[in-house]
Image: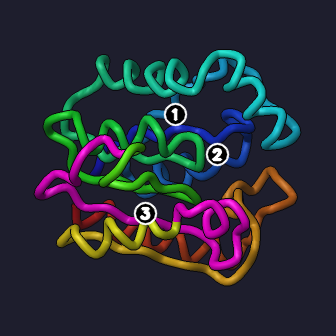
Amino acid sequence: MAEVLLFHHAQGLTPGVRAFADDLRATGHVVHTPDLFDGRTFRSIDEGLAYIGEIGFDDMRERGVRVADQLPSELIYAGFSFGVLPAQKLAQTRPGARGALLFYSCLPISGEWAFGPWPDGVAVQIHGMDNDPIFVGEGDIDAAREIVEKVEDGELFLYPGDQHYFADSSLPSYDADATALLTIRVLEFLDRV
């Protein structure tokens, strides 16, 4: 059994994010799903990003990081898109991290946006669609490739398609086949890390 801290994407803690967490819980894992938006959800990525912008991206990321203060140190950190910001920061900087699951987004481990090098012994899986205009078009895929090249237990999985939030069953971007495969891979990761 693994314990996971799972951060939602820019549209908020949607029913689809909750359903994904429930699927992991159904197999015996403990999954924490903090609501960084205090109950707000948004109809589009742009609306959610505008809200994050009002609060401040750094402040919102740190809100997520502070959630971990109330939890054990030996966690797997997971995030969907915007949620990758606190998840990846915690995986790279909080002692005791067991692993990271990064969905649709990834930050570099070198250069201006980096939290520093990837820590030894922290496994990572990164998932995205091969034609996602955000994941591929904005360079996240390059950051993902840098990580898996340098991390012993690092994996990058690409799925055919052009959707960003493809594993959120409550949104039109949902891809059931890709999500089924993603879920199998995530459960295998949780069982071995």
Outermost residue, left direction?
120
Q: Position of residue 78 (x, y in %)?
A: 43, 47
Q: CA distance from mark 1 to mark 2?
A: 9 Å
Q: Decide whether residue 133 is among the magenta residues.
A: yes
Q: CA distance from mark 1 to mark 3?
A: 25 Å
Q: Position of residue 22 (x, y in %)?
A: 56, 47
The structure residue drawn at horizontal position 76% and vertical position 33%, both measured from the top left corner, is 48
Residue type (three-letter) at the residue carrying disc 1: Thr
Q: Decide whether residue 81 is among the magenta residues.
A: no
Q: Position of residue 105 (x, y in %)?
A: 54, 56
Residue type (three-letter) at the residue carrying disc 2: Val
Q: Nearer the viewer, residue 121 or 151?
A: 151
Q: Residues within 10 Å of mark 3 (few under 14, many from 20)?
A: some
Q: Tell me the residue that label 1 is attached to.
A: 33
Q: Nearer the viewer, residue 105 or 100?
A: 105
The disc, 1 or 3, on the residue closer to the chain's N-terminal end is 1
Give the structural element (helix, strand or loop) at label 1: loop
- Total labels: the figure holds 3
Q: Quadrant of residue 46?
A: top right
Q: Position of residue 52 (x, y in %)?
A: 67, 26
| Quadrant including the C terminus | bottom left
Res. 33 in view: yes
Question: Which circle marks residue 96 in the picture?
Answer: none
Res. 30 in view: no
In the rendered structure, which segment of residues is drawn in magenta? 114-140
The disc, 3 or 2, on the residue closer to the chain's N-terminal end is 2
Residue type (three-letter) at the residue carrying disc 3: Ala
Contact flag, marks 1 and 2 (Cβ < 8 Å): yes
- Residue 17 vertical position relative to residue 64 in the rendered view, above or below: below
Q: Tell me the residue that label 3 is attached to.
A: 143
- Residue 185 vertical position relative to residue 72 in the rendered view, above or below: below
Question: Which circle marks residue 17 in the picture?
Answer: 2
